[in-house]
Image: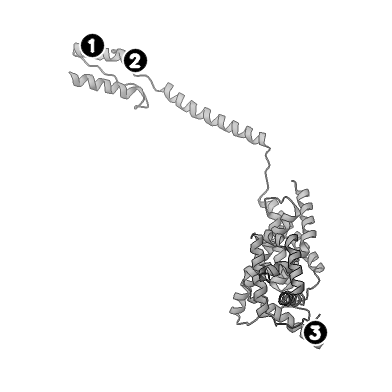
Amino acid sequence: MNDKTKERFFEQVYKEVFPVVMKVAYHITKNLPAAEDVCQEAFIKFYHRPMLFPNMEEAKYWLIRVVKNLGFNYLEHEKVKSRAFDKIKFEPSFTEETGEKNLMKQETVEQVSRALEQLPENLRAPIILREYGGMNYKEISKALGISESNVKIRIFRGREALEKLLPRGEVYVP
Amino acid sequence: MCPDLEILSTYYDDEIPETHRKEIEIHVSSCQKCQKILKEFENISGFMEQVPEPDFTASAGNVWDRISDSLEKDDVRQDFWHRKVWFSFPAAAAVAAVFIAVFSISVLSYYIGRNSTSAPVVSQELNLTDAKDYSQSVEQLFEDDTLDFVIPASDSFVHAGEPLLIREVDFKARRY
């Protein structure tokens, strides 16, 4: 494969995979610039990888796995940093809206963020890929390198944990 | 009997095989407990959906620009420091063959040179050109009661032939 074909494949992968990879990165880091950094690093790693991918799907799974790892690394760093600066909580950088309804929405968002934060990484990653990435069990198992039955169990355990952390029986604001 | 919660979670994700799905569907439609559990899963998804997502189209452009900048920089560095030198395989093989040939010739010629330059042990009186004749000559020599030993005119003293000669002389000398 020469440089031209390599570049063309890279561009193709970027166009196709970036949206889902960015989504995953964003919901892990909960920070837009950080998610962009994570994606940039992942794609540069992908570019420099000597082994080629047989198809788009394999490239996608590889990128999602790298983004997931980089995202959680970022969170780990942030945790250490916020501890160092004696910052209690990392504020998600959501676009601020006004109005009572939006205030409620803001509260819900924070509840979800806090609940997800309490999930261990091995439960949080499959839940994020399922709920935000819209991936099925097979895709998640390939991206995370675990078996499908393991994905099934982890998603269920994640839901179980979230159910306890999120307000019960409360109907979400549509 | 109600299905396992894990199975309900799988059912919620639409990951139950076709054959069992119908079964569960029929059960769920008549079981309030299971309906409630599925409602809870829906509730979780609903909560998670509430987390807004910024528009990622701008990010796609930004990140692409940053990636190409970074890769270009790498390329420049590579041009300067790590210029790739490409050999086709036959060229590399030819270079290797020439190297091996030159190396082996130089090594061989060194040994051949050593063999030919060191003078064979020859004494004018004894004519010791070869070891068999030489042992006889030593016997004769002792019979005559005279020993005239000529040190070979060689620059390399310990040579393949010489220890044999010395040993032979030593042995014969001790016998008498």
Q: Please tell me which residue lies in front, B54 or B123.
A: B54
**Residue under the point 68% across and 50% down:** A51
Kind of residue indicated by mark 3: Asn
Residue A112 location, x and y as percent? 71, 78
Tell me how far mark 1 sits from mark 3, CA to CA. 125 Å
Q: Are marks 1 and 3 on the same chain?
A: no
Q: Amino acid at mark 2?
A: Asp
Q: Mark 2 falls on what kind of element?
A: loop
Chain for disc number 2: B
Whether residue A37 appears in this view of the structure is: no
Pointers 3 and 2 within a single chain: no
Upstream in the sequence, badge 2 or badge 1?
Answer: 2
Q: Which residue is mark 2?
A: B130
Where residue A34 sits, quadrant-wise, is bottom right
Mark in the foreground, 3 or 2: 3
Residue at numbered disc 1: B140
Disc 3 from disc 2: Cα separation: 112 Å
**Residue A156 locus on image (x, y percent):** 66, 70
- The residue sitting at 69% across, 54% down in the picture is A48
Q: Amino acid at mark 1?
A: Gln
Seen in the picture, residue B91 relative to B12 is either above or below; the reply is above
Q: Which residue is mark 3?
A: A102
